[in-house]
Image (tube, rainbow, N blue to C red):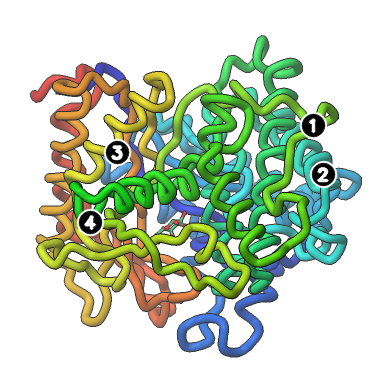
Amino acid sequence: MFPPDFAWGAATSAFQIEGGWQADGKGPSIWDTFCHEKGNVFGDQTGDVACNSYELWEKDLECIQQLGLTHYRLSVSWARLLPDGMTQHVNQRGVQYYNRVINDLLACNVSPMVTLYHFDLPQALHDLGGWKSPEIATLFDNYAKFCFQTFGDRVKFWITINEPHICAKLGYEDGIHAPGLKEKGTTAYLVGHNMLRAHAKAWHSYNSEYRAKQKGAVSLAFNSDWFEPLDPSCSADITATEREFAFTLGWFAWPVFVTGDYPETMRFAINSQSQKLGFDGTSRLPTFSDDDPFILGTADFFALNYYTARKVKAGGGVDQTLSMKSDLDAKEVLDPSWPICGAPWLAVVPHGLRKLLRYIKDTFHNPMVYITENGFSQMGPVQIEDWERWEFYSSTISEVAKAIQEDGVNVRGYFAWSLMDNFEWADGFSVRFGLFHVDPSDAELSRTMYRSGREYARIISKYKTSGQAK
Ligand code: GAL
């Protein structure tokens, strides 16, 4: 059913679970600042304590063991390791914390997959220009090299940046994620550009300085929905669907896997819109120069975060304003037959993952794929017997099996989002994605296994190691 040594994982990220926002010398990140400002997060909740994984790591490890995971995806907090973001000042207590996490995982036979950047830029670097400044690529590379040097003897899977598309769009265009900027139609492209430059620099550092000795693999995690035309016989809807793919997945995966540059569709759409609005001749989508690190080929595997699907209808761009929305000029529509789970954006479409995997195989030269996030959310009353979530996981996992067996996609692992309920960004704790329930108002922050966790553990023990059902 699954390749032998298929990775069965679950994922979390530092800001969403650790808490300890000022503990032992940690510096603030843009998410600390963002949630301390009123009105940005549901109920003005913060990540100050979150699941308190900084103090309760053993509890997380117990959850990981109960599930029988082979892999655990976590992120390290840049500002916990380097409080002002720079390598001149290392917070040894932060290093100790992650050493302990990594060593404990390995002692339990669980391989860590470590993300270096999961939305939480050190505030000090943001104050110096952050992702808008070209200097960030060197600062990120120094941070990455520090992590490879410190943890790379034991960590064999690295993700440099999680979901650059979400970071750039939600943080700098829509302003609903930190740092909360709404600089429409320009900054997100610049931020995305610097993220690609930063990623590529770090990949090259690993490749030339660490790979021979450490023998690990480095990538970045793309997010993409599955898109299909609302009317499959309408050519405008078909090209709008191509634009959706280009502006979401292609924006980052095309440069890394196909040409070293942005998809033509994307540049064309942005430039045409600029022209219409009488914007000057310089493209709002930056260009890579000879001084930039070479982008093509800077991923050792394809890391995909998949959650949902959308139908696409042409048009809907707001013609007279500069924005990503008008550049894209497409409308996303939900198929009424798709159930919504928890968060309103989350239509349940497991078969979309199989189609997306096939698309990735065909578009990006049949890469080795890890599904680094996929999950189902709950809102309102807590249901520990979360059969719907389990149904979702079970059908998604069987779609993955079909993609492997029938479509020949080289999928090597699957990570459920998330190990436990946690701080769901602007939704705070109101949206729950866990395989374990955590109640933020419980003083103990105990972890209680959901039914879906129990069932996932059953599937893992069935297929673990040999890939064949036991
Ligand atoms: C992803 C993100 C995760 C998690 C998830 C569920 O975009 O990487 O941190 O929040 O969405 O919304």
Do labels 4 and 1 touch, CB within 8 Å? no
Residue at the far right in the pictured view: 88
User: Could you tell me which secondary element the residue under label 2 belongs to?
Assistant: helix
Where residue 451 sits: x, y (%)? Answer: 15, 58
Where residue 276 sits: x, y (%)? Answer: 62, 63
Q: Nearer the viewer, mark 4 or mark 3?
A: 4
Q: Which mark is residue 139?
A: 2
Where residue 374 sits: x, y (%)? Answer: 32, 49
Where is mark 4, residue-wise?
A: 230
Q: Is residue 74 left or right of residue 3?
A: right
Report the Cα–Cα distance between label 1 and label 3.
Answer: 30 Å
Report the Cα–Cα distance between label 1 and label 2.
Answer: 14 Å
Report the Cα–Cα distance between label 4 and label 1.
Answer: 39 Å
Q: Residues within 10 Å of mark 1 (few under 14, many from 20)?
A: some
Residue at the far top in the pictured view: 212
Mark earlier in primary sequence (2, 4)? 2
Q: Is residue 132 left or right of residue 312?
A: right
In terms of depth relative to the viewer, which is nearer, 446 or 418? 418
Mark earlier in primary sequence (1, 2)? 2
